[in-house]
Image: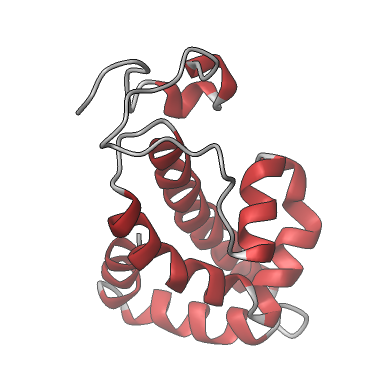
């Protein structure tokens, strides 16, 4: 997730400018820049949330997820990102928000080296991410 986001920002100087200004706080952004920042945040955080659910469903190794997630948890604490989430919290699952706030993963997370327990099903994750992994199957 951190590599995808870095590529997203590095590919365009204007995007980099909007990220830099917006992450410090959205209050002083012009309307067009605020809209661009919100779109950038939506792209980023849906990537991160997708990887969170892929990890929960057992499609991403624990060590891989933890290494990448630390950057997301740190970015979540930036003032502009906090403002974005305060206005758009309902666009994300409660479990994902809790993970970003605490940086801790639930104890019931399934890892690649274990089969998915019977109680964990694709319906437990957002439908857009359910296709990432097949519960009950090792990848």
Determine the image quadrant of residue 71: bottom left
| Residue at image location 29% in from the left, 61% down from the top | 4
| Residue at image location 45% in from the left, 19% down from the top | 117
What is the x, y in percent for residue 70?
45, 70
Determine the image quadrant of residue 87: bottom right
131 or 65, nearer to the observer: 65
How are the residues colored? secondary structure
129 or 123, nearer to the observer: 123
Q: Taking 43 as reference, is 5 left or right? A: left
85 or 121, nearer to the observer: 121
Total numbered circles: 0
In the depicted structure, whether residue 61 falls above or below residue 67:
above
In the depicted structure, whether residue 37 falls above or below residue 65:
below
- Of the 4 image quadrants, the one containing the C terminus is top left
Q: Taking 94 as reference, is 7 left or right? A: left
What is the x, y in percent for residue 57?
41, 30
- Of the 4 image quadrants, the one containing the N terminus is bottom left
What is the x, y in percent for residue 92?
65, 43
What is the x, y in percent for residue 79?
70, 81
| Residue at image location 48% in from the left, 17% down from the top | 122
| Residue at image location 75% in from the left, 70% down from the top | 83
């Amino acid at each position: 997730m951190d590599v995808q986001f870095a590529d997203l920002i590095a590919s365009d100087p204007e995007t980099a400018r909007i990220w830099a200004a917006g992450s410090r706080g959205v209050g002083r952004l012009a309307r067009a820049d605020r809209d661009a920042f919100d779109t950038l945040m939506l792209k980023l955080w849906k990537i991160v949330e997708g990887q969170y659910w892929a990890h929960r469903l057992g499609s991403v190794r624990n060590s891989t997820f933890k290494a990448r997630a630390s950057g997301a948890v740190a970015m979540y604490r930036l003032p502009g990102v906090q403002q974005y989430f305060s206005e758009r919290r309902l666009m994300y699952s409660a479990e994902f928000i809790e993970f970003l706030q605490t940086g801790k993963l639930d104890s019931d997370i399934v890892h690649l080296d274990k089969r998915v327990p019977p109680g964990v099903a694709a319906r437990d994750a957002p439908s857009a991410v359910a296709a990432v992994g097949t519960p009950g199957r090792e990848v």
